């Protein structure tokens, strides 16, 4: 359930002054106009996202009436994050964390960049393990067979082999008069089983509506999520937490009222967004300078692409659209976007 302090938090945001001066590169935060510019770029690059005005009675004066928040609907979520026990440990995930967070620092806080193995990676690892197990088993069987043959004095006599071959060859003359009847019965049984299990073979996929608002108190974007079952019924708060990494569920991600639409949503608290974005931007800028590019940092239009990339570490199984190529160069470059489509 939402916190009892929700009305006080809403009043706090209302009374907070509106940021007028850009602090994107120095503090990792945005002005309302920068939030709109970043949102326009996201909508342009990712057509699944769009602007909405929401409830007219809840509109914020510091944002345009038709650009109160961003939303993407029907985002597929095929598996539960809470059921994924193959979270990569820190040693294996160090490269991923270092790429965004720079390997540590005072500004990093306790932010965790998690990586979940995909279904394909899990299947591949299981197949490799199975092959290794069979190879080991085959080796043991061959070794035992060789030892057994040595104990009994070598291979069986040729005459004994020929007698066995003749014995099994006689089986080819056997013919079952009821073979057609047996085959028909088998086909009928298989068809009945298939009909009974047809529904169990359908992949049941949850979907989510994600929205991004501007939090005037923290001066950063804030993500809200509303989940639906495969039948279209709204998920409970407990069910939505199944799709959040355990390190964040009911801590960083809590149930809150949406500022623009009715209903309780899962919300990613923005208290550390500014510090995390500052660290990421700092490391992106340092990386571009080390590579010999012009001094500067990523443009403010790239903010939401970077933001959504690190948010995905908390909700890795909710496959919304976000950029996979973030550059800190001041030169204009093409941004590549992956579009996830439900099948």
Image: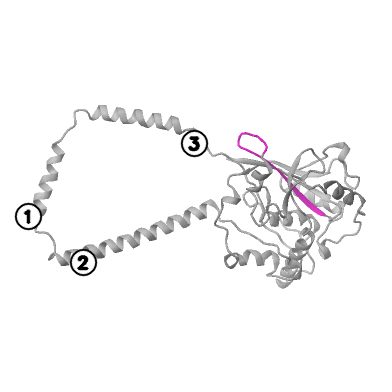
| Residue 228 falls within the magenta-colored stretch | yes
Per the image, the residue denoted by label 2 is 147
* Residue 13 percent coordinates (x, y): 88, 51
- Few, some or many C-alpha atoms within 10 Å of disc 3 (few <14, some 14-19, many ≥20)? few
Q: Which of 10 and 111 is in front in this view?
A: 10
Nearest-to-viewer mark from 1 and 2:
2
- Segment colored magenta: 220-234
Per the image, the residue denoted by label 1 is 159
Q: Quadrant of residue 97?
A: bottom right
Please give left or right for residue 274 compared with residue 320 in the image: right
Nearest-to-viewer mark from 3 and 1:
3
User: Vertically, is 5 above or below 110?
Assistant: above
Task: Give the structural element (helix, strand or loop) at label 1.
Answer: helix
Q: How is the image coloured?
A: one colour
- The numbered mark at residue 200 is 3
Q: In which quarter of the image is residue 177?
A: top left
Please give left or right for residue 212 compared with residue 149 in the image: right
* Residue 31 percent coordinates (x, y): 87, 55
């Amino acid at each position: 359930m939402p916190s009892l302090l929700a009305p006080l938090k809403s009043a706090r945001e209302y009374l907070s002054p509106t940021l007028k001066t850009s602090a994107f590169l120095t503090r990792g935060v945005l002005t309302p106009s920068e939030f709109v510019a970043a949102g326009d770029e996201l909508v342009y690059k990712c057509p699944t996202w769009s602007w909405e005005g929401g409830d007219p009675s809840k509109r914020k004066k510091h944002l345009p009436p038709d650009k109160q928040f961003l939303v993407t609907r029907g985002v597929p979520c095929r598996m539960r994050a809470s059921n994924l026990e193959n979270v990569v440990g820190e040693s294996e995930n160090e490269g991923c964390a270092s790429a965004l967070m720079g390997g540590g620092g005072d500004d990093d806080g306790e932010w965790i960049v998690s990586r979940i193995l995909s279904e394909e990676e899990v299947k591949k690892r299981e197949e490799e393990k199975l092959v290794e197990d069979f190879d080991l088993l085959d080796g043991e069987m061959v070794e035992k067979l060789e030892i057994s043959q040595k104990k009994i004095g070598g291979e069986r006599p040729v005459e004994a082999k020929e007698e066995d071959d003749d014995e099994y060859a006689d089986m080819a003359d056997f013919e079952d008069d009821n073979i057609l009847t047996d085959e028909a019965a088998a086909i009928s049984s298989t068809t009945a089983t298939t009909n009974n299990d047809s529904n169990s073979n359908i992949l049941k996929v949850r979907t989510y509506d994600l929205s991004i608002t501007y939090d005037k108190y923290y001066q950063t974007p804030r993500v809200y999520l509303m989940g639906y079952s495969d039948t279209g019924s709204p998920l409970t708060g407990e069910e939505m937490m199944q799709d959040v990494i355990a390190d964040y569920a009911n801590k960083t991600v809590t149930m809150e009222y949406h500022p623009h639409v009715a209903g309780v949503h899962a919300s990613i608290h923005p208290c550390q967004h500014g510090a995390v974005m500052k660290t990421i931007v700092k490391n992106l800028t340092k990386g571009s300078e080390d590579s010999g590019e012009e001094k500067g940092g990523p443009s403010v239009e790239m903010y939401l692409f970077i933001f959504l990339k690190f948010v995905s570490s908390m909700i890795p199984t909710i496959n919304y659209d976000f950029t996979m190529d973030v550059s800190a160069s001041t030169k204009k470059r093409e941004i590549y976007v992956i579009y996830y489509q439900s099948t």
